[in-house]
Image (cartoon, helix red, strand yellow):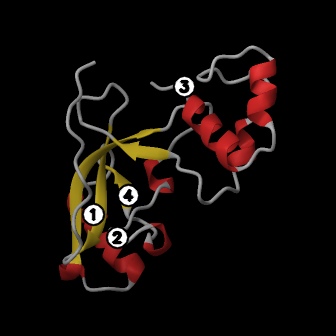
Amino acid sequence: MSDTATAFRPEDCCWAASGWDDAGEGSVRDARTVSRDKARADFARWACEPWVEARAWKRYMRPLPRTDLYVWWVENRSEGEWEAHDARGLAPDQVPDEWDESVLDFEDDCPRWEFVHRSHPDAIPVWICGWRNDDPPRNPEARDA
């Protein structure tokens, strides 16, 4: 698995075709433990919408590694961290051992996961739920390793 430090649960993620602001509870479900029909029915019920309007697409996701989370934090929330990072002689892809990932716990706009091709070594199968007229999420192409 990736170098994420905290437990990752797909059910804690959400997605919407129109963007983060419209993402709803139950829009991402772990396909290893939930059937497509259950994911779709739960999503519609939680949104108080008719089941026939809901859709579920199978995709694959992975939690972002600690390195990517650190880079996001440095670029978006820290002050002077790149200078301190360089002063310690760390390479751009090295996370300081003392960095506490929990600083991101209340950062709603911090990306925590991404769609990946099913062949990715960290791929987790998920149901992505949306509505009848939504464009399904893009399915990434396989990349040669």
Closer to the N terminus: mark 1 or mark 4? 4
User: Alpha-carbon distance for marks 4 and 3?
Assistant: 22 Å
Q: What x and y, as percent, mark residue 85?
A: 76, 25
Whether tag 4 and tag 3 are in contact, CB under 8 A, the answer is no
Closer to us: 136 or 39? 136
Q: Position of residue 74 (x, y in %)?
A: 69, 40
What residue does disc 1 label?
Answer: 38
What residue lies at 41% left-to-right and 68% top-to-bottom?
A: 19
**Mark 1, secondary structure of its residue:** helix
Provide the residue designation for mark 3. Answer: 3
User: Looking at numbered disc 2 in the image, what kind of residue is underneath it?
Assistant: Asp
The answer to which image quadrant residue 24 occupies is: bottom left
Nearer the N terminus, badge 3 or badge 1? 3
Residue lying furthest top: 89
* Disc marking residue 42: 2
Q: Which residue is mark 4?
A: 28
Tell me if mark 1 has few (under 14), some (14-19) or many (20+) residues whose alpha carbon lies within 10 angstroms of its own.
Answer: few
Q: How packed is label 2: few (under 14 Cα within 10 Å), some, or many (20 or more)?
A: some
